[in-house]
Image (cartoon, rainbow, N blue to C red):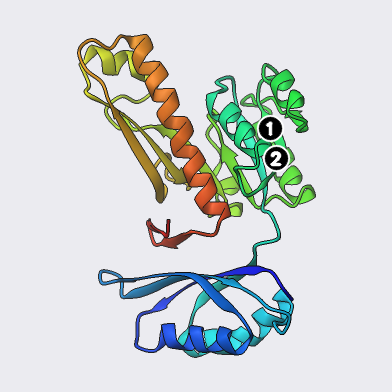
Amino acid sequence: MSGQVALTLSCTDRPGIVRAVSDFFFGQGCDIVQSNQFGDPSSGLFFMRVHMKTSASTPEPDALAGAFARVADEFGMQWQLHDLAVRPRVLLMVSRLDHCLEDLLYRWRSGLLAADVVAVVSNHPDLAPLVEWHGVPFHHVPVTPDSKADAEQRLLGLVAELEVELVVLARYMQVLSDRVCAELSGRIINIHHSFLPSFKGARPYHRAHDRGVKLIGATAHYVTTDLDEGPIIEQDVARVDHQSSVEDLVAIGRDVESRTLARAVQWHVQRRVLLNGQRTVVFT
């Protein structure tokens, strides 16, 4: 097999892990392109990502993974071996605000996003023309208090049918149930402004303007049953001042949200994000 693979792993930190990994893949005809590792003193865990080129003598990915399992078992690793020729399948969710959606669709169409966008789901029909112009199937799934359970079942059905690996909430303004969060744990990324918890609810930029904030920020994180408190993947900020109007704050905030979400999605699909309890290790 000639191609590229990425190994991600975590385990209890102890001597010999890097050598064991390197020796194994050298013996399988692999050439290490990039290797990142981190030993977390607070948890005692070791995290590693290795990006490798394979050769004609390297077994196919499934066989390579099967052989590596013996090394992984020796160190008690949680691990995955990814064939980088296989592009992750991504489903985007959105309500009416389109800035994050448009940014991700542009990156996908331009070849800048290392994934395939296979569908967009929205609880409103407003953005159907935009999505269809990009050549992506659009699914209007209305959500009311009475239909929420059916809507979420349809979402999970699409995830299964389309073999979706990652769901991205690109300003989807509905709270997902504990069931969905649990079934897609580690597979849903959300974006929101970083005014929380000071300015919750509607019109946060207006309320932030009233308080004279000096920083606009955004947070991209994995979705958990704790609302807006999942493991953080990426954050970014932009400075503002007394001259900035509410409209300025909204425009700056949307730009920060778009680029923060895009980086988080890109790092996830490039297999650069590893969960560390309520935190993440991100090998950029």
Depth order, front residue of 155/26 = 26
Q: Residue at x 53, y 45 (%)?
A: 265
* Position in image of residue 161 (x %, y %): 79, 48
Q: Nearer the viewer, mark 1 or mark 2?
A: 1
Q: Residues within 10 Å of mark 1 (few under 14, many from 20)?
A: many
Q: Residue at x 37, y 56 (%)?
A: 278
Query: Vertical placement of 88 versus 95: above or below?
Result: below
Pointer 1 residue: 121
Task: Identify residue type, mark 2.
Answer: Leu
Depth order, front residue of 92/157 = 92
Q: Verify CB contact (< 8 Å) between mark 1 and mark 2.
A: yes
Q: Residues within 10 Å of mark 2 (few under 14, many from 20)?
A: some
Task: Identify residue type, mark 1.
Answer: Val
Which disc number belongs to residue 155? 2
In this rendering, position of residue 236 left or right of residue 77: left
Depth order, front residue of 185/162 = 162
Mark 2 or mark 1, which is nearer the start of the sequence? 1
Q: Residue at x 74, y 77 (%)?
A: 60
Query: Vertical placement of 52 versus 199: above or below?
Result: below
Query: Vertical placement of 178 versus 80: above or below?
Result: above
The answer to which quarter of the image holds residue 219 is top left
Q: Quadrant of the N terminus?
A: bottom right
